[in-house]
Image (cartoon, rainbow, N blue to C red):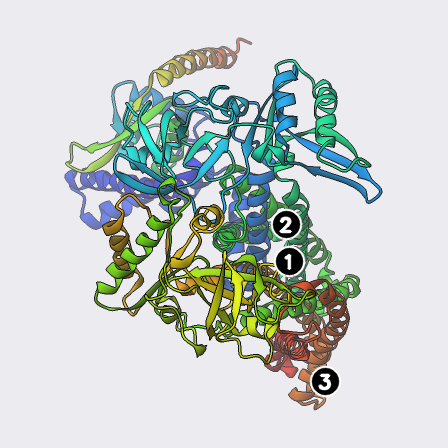
């Protein structure tokens, strides 16, 4: 057996050995006085036929079961190489089908199937509330309020519970340690949080009950990454002081490497559990672990007794509230579960269609090979051997397709991850692993049987005598499956139309949104965001000084045209506040709501927002100067239509301010104000000088919003990034910059969810188009090979190539036409569902529909024409002589 | 030129093993030794030795290595493995029994 795999090498060795034998013999004979010629002849005569002996040994070393399969394999490769077009099409189809399945299964596996990375994950739970009232029954994983949590924590006997506070908007928080400033992501958790998850700290301890109460000691635990990056794995870190948001904290623990609770965190602080403040609302996420030996039923009963009455206080009196325990993993992935399984089903369907397509191609090809197969059977090959041969061929195809599919799947996955970065977080690592690869292998082998068996059985049923006598054109067993395949092609085209129309509309939406006039000049603008939710920056004087000094420092640098600071960047969400009219205020119309931002001088200039009337802010608009404000065009339209607003007064940001200028509309993301619900709006906005903001307002706003510096310069991002950091460092070396990016990236991020949906649907649309093309190609191919004889006769009788081609191609185009008609009707219905995702394009956009229909018909034409062209190579004389 | 004698099925293996009991040898030597020790009576077709060598090696009764021969040529040498030595004992015994049995049957008949 082991010699089986080394036969080639052994054979060569054997040849050398026999040659040595002959040489020795000759040596002896010559030594005995023979002539060289005679000696050579004699040696060969006595030795026998070396080739025959080598063959005998070669056969001895082969294994009877393997031998035919190896032969089949070799033959399969030869056949696949001989028909490269078929091979490539089949491989691409399979690679796409298997690839998207691999990608989606990877996500399903990582999120739904893999157990959470904690010990005994099946005993982890969270709470689900079912609330019933006149408005209906709602069942959902629910944030808990402090009172409910405290009741559970203090009284539950079946569970250990812990909570995580909500939060983490936008940028992270400022940390200063060992004179290094960093922007870190903070998570706030209760005592026992890590114990409930079942992961002990790598060093030190987790939070105690005394630290987890209002006014408790300020302590922190570090992630392994933060400990490594900032503290160089200092073994004496426990007990060290760090500064978080300008307040001192003591490090009490470090979590082990690889700890991942489904979100990104650099450090943890106590949530300071309470029934008031944050705990007054349902802001806590609950984690519970069943105590040893406790059944789910018992724990559920206790939860409903302890938690339900407390939770009920959060609802109206007429609402009945019931709390249930739910396994943590199911709750965490609850929102994703259904869409993911649906997506999985959809890509499963894609694979099925891919298989049917490949089967169609194989049937078409086995038609061409009927003669070869008949010859082999006539020469004594058994039906079983023929089927085996054809199955080996499809297995080779499927395995190669599977291998390519893993590549495609990996690429799709990377793309999916890239696209989803700003849209949602997978939480846990999504990677190809053994289970995924195993599934891919099973898929590949399963599909090979699926698409290989039917054609193989059909092909092996050929009528040997008939086929050989007639020249191998009549005996294809294609008739039965034909209707089904035609329906499939119609379905594929229809599906393609629906998906491509949807994709087209989403693409037009995206292009529309991206092409909108931003209202300013985003090129050559760098933005830097800094979190000022910091004890050291609660004082307005310090904030103003920070702005003034950093801007002065930046303006001193060469290559910088303009710089300013704003509370709200364009293409992000702005702050909403009320304003009051001064002139013309009536009882009915005292003012209204508006978007608002503070800005420094230089901001309008850095973004090149056009000044319509009056002026922008200058350095003379100081704290002590007369209060002023700027408004934008939309504000004027909305509240002061047809009035000259410059010189009028509005009450905003604790002062009556004179409106000194009107500027253009810089676009923002939807904030609930500003008219339509489009993802990108032209907000009506009021701008107030940062220098004139009321003293306490910075502290209030900076909890939710972080100011951004905008700098206009033609220098590259890398240089600018360093320049900005240097400027900030020169003013406050312990203030970290949270994020630096070009204005263009900020704009892109605002459209990331549109980009994600568009790419997903467009990807599916392209796959559908590909499958439709291959389906048509396969169908026409087999039709041509079935009709070779008929077509040959018609050619011989004087039909022109053109007529014949037309005749064949019409079939494919007619099927595609039916599919397009069905698909267009389907698309008209489907786009209604899409309506709320579309902007700047009507759901029935004729241009999109026309483009998709033309594309599909063109693809159908090409897919039919390619196999039809084979007819032109037909030699009528040959076709007929075979009769 | 001796006449060609058909070997009894399976005896070639035994002869090869027996030859190798004298020490390692390459194919040509094995063929020559068998010929000489049988007083040139057993003239195997020398090539047919090689399938037998292949079989014996596959069964682990002999193993082989390349070395330089007395004629200063590269040749493949075969030698008995311990397993082969035991096998040879079994075969020798069986052969002796068979030869004795045949001799008994073939002894002159007294009429």
User: Which type of secondary structure does the marked residue at label 1 adopt?
Assistant: helix
Quadrant hosting residue A106: top right
| Mark drawn on residue A794 | 3
Q: Residue at x 68, y 79 (%)?
A: A846
**Which mark is in front, 3 or 2?**
2
Q: Are marks 1 and 2 in contact (CB under 8 Å)?
A: yes
Q: Which residue is mark 1?
A: A354
Q: Residue at x 60, y 51 (%)?
A: A389
Q: Which mark is residue A447?
A: 2
Residue A222 versus residue A854: which sits nearer the camera? A222
- The chain identifier of the residue carrying mark 3 reads A
- Near mark 3 (Cα within 10 A), the count class, few <14, some 14-19 or many ≥20, is some
- A19 relative to A662, above or below: above
Q: Residues within 10 Å of mark 2 (few under 14, many from 20)?
A: many
Chain letter behind tag 1: A
Camera-side residue of A174 and A158: A174
Please identify, in this view, whether the residue under mark 1 or under mark 2 is nearer the observer. Answer: 1
Instruction: Using the image, determine if residue B92 lies above or below residue A277.
Output: above
Mark sitting earlier along the chain (3/2): 2
Tell me where residue A196 appears, x and y as whole percent.
55, 23
């Amino acid at each position: 057996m082991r010699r089986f795999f080394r036969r080639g090498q052994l054979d060569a060795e054997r040849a050398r050995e026999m040659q040595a034998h002959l040489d020795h013999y000759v040596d002896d004979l010559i030594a005995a006085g023979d002539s060289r010629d005679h000696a050579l002849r004699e040696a060969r005569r006595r030795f026998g036929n070396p080739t025959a002996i080598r063959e005998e040994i070669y056969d001895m070393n082969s294994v009877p079961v393997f031998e035919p399969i190896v032969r089949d394999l070799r033959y399969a490769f030869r056949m696949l190489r001989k028909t490269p077009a078929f091979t490539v099409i089949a491989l691409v189809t399979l690679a796409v089908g298997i690839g998207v399945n691999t990608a989606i299964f990877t996500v399903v596996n990582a999120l739904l199937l893999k157990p959470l990375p904690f010990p005994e994950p099946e005993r982890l739970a969270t709470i689900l509330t079912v609330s019933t009232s006149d408005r209906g029954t709602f069942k959902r994983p629910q944030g808990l309020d402090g009172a409910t949590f405290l009741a559970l924590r203090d009284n539950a006997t079946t569970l250990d519970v812990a909570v995580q506070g909500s939060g983490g908007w936008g940028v992270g928080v400022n940390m200063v340690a060992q004179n290094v400033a960093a922007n870190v992501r903070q998570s706030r958790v209760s005592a026992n949080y890590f114990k409930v998850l079942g992961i002990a700290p790598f060093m030190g301890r987790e939070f105690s009950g005394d630290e987890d109460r209002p006014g408790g000691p300020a302590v922190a635990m570090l992630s392994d990454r933060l400990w490594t990056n900032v503290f160089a794995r200092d073994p004496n870190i426990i007990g060290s002081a760090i500064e978080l948001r300008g307040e001192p904290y003591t490090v009490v623990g470090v979590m082990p490497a690889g700890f991942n609770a489904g979100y990104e965190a650099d450090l943890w602080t106590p949530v300071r559990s309470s029934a008031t403040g944050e705990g007054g609302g349902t802001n806590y996420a609950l984690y519970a672990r069943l105590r040893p030996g406790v059944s789910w039923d018992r724990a559920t009963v206790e939860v409903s007794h302890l938690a339900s009455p407390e939770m009920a206080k959060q609802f109206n009196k007429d609402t009945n509230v019931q709390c249930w325990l739910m396994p943590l993993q199911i709750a965490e992935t609850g929102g994703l579960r259904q869409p993911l399984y649906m997506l999985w089903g959809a890509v499963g369907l894609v694979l099925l269609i891919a298989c049917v397509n490949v089967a169609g191609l194989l049937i078409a090809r086995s038609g061409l090979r009927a003669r070869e197969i008949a010859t082999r059977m006539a020469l004594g090959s058994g039906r079983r051997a023929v089927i085996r041969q054809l199955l080996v061929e499809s297995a080779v195809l499927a395995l190669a397709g599977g291998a390519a599919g893993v590549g495609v799947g990996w690429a799709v996955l990377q793309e999916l991850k890239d696209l989803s970065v700003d849209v949602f977080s997978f939480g846990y690592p999504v990677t190809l692993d053994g289970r995924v690869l195993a599934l891919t292998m099973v898929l590949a082998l399963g599909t090979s049987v699926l698409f290989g068996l039917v054609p193989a059985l059909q092909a092996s049923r050929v009528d040997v005598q008939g086929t050989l006598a007639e020249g191998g054109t009549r005996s294809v067993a294609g008739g039965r499956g034909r209707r089904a395949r035609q329906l499939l092609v119609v379905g594929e085209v229809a599906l393609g139309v629906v998906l491509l129309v949807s994709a087209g509309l989403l693409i037009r939406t995206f292009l529309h949104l991206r092409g909108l006039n931003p209202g300013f000049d985003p090129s050559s603008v760098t933005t830097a965001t800094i979190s000022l939710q910091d004890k050291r920056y609660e004082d307005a004087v310090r904030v103003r000084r920070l702005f003034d000094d950093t801007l002065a420092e930046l303006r001193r640098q060469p290559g910088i045209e303009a710089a300013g600071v704003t509370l709200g960047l364009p293409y992000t969400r702005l702050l909403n506040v009320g304003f009051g009219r001064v002139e013309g205020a009536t009882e009915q119309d005292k003012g209204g709501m508006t978007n608002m931002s503070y800005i420094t001088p230089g901001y309008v200039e850095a973004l090149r927002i056009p000044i319509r009337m009056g002026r922008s802010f200058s350095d003379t608009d100081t704290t002590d100067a007369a209060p002023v404000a700027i408004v934008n065009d939309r504000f004027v339209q909305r509240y002061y239509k047809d009035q000259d607003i410059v010189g009028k007064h509005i009450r905003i940001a604790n002062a009556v301010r004179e409106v000194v200028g009107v500027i253009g509309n810089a676009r923002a993301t939807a904030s609930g104000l500003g008219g339509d619900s489009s993802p990108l709006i032209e907000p009506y906005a009021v701008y107030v000088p940062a220098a004139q903001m009321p003293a306490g307002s910075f502290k209030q706003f900076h909890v939710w919003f972080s100011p951004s510096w905008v700098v206009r310069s033609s220098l590259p991002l890398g240089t600018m990034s360093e320049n900005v950091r240097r400027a900030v460092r020169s003013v406050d070396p312990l203030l970290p910059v949270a994020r630096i990016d070009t204005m263009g990236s900020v704009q892109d991020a605002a459209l990331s969810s549109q980009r994600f949906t568009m790419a997903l649907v467009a990807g599916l649309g392209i796959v559908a188009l590909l499958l439709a093309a291959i389906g048509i190609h396969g169908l026409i191919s087999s039709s041509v090979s079935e009709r070779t004889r008929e077509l040959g006769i018609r050619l011989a009788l004087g039909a022109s190539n053109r007529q014949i081609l037309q005749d064949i191609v019409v079939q494919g185009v007619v099927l595609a036409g039916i599919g397009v008609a069905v698909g267009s009707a389907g698309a008209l219905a489907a786009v209604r569902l899409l309506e709320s995702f579309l902007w700047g394009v009507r759901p029935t956009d004729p241009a999109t529909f026309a483009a998709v229909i033309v594309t599909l018909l063109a693809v159908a034409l090409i897919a039919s024409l390619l196999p039809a062209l084979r007819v032109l190579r037909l030699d009528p004389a040959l076709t007929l002589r075979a009769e | 030129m001796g006449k060609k004698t058909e070997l009894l099925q399976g005896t070639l293996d035994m002869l090869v093993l027996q030859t190798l009991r004298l020490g390692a040898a390459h194919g040509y030597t094995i063929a020559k030794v068998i010929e000489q020790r049988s007083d040139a009576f057993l003239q195997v077709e020398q090539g047919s030795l090689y399938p037998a060598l292949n079989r014996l090696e596959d069964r682990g009764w002999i193993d082989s290595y390349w070395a330089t021969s007395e004629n200063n040529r590269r040749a493949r040498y075969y030698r008995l493995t311990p397993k082969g030595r035991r096998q040879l004992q079994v075969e020798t015994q069986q052969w002796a029994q068979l030869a004795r049995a045949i001799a008994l049957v073939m002894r002159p008949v007294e009429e």
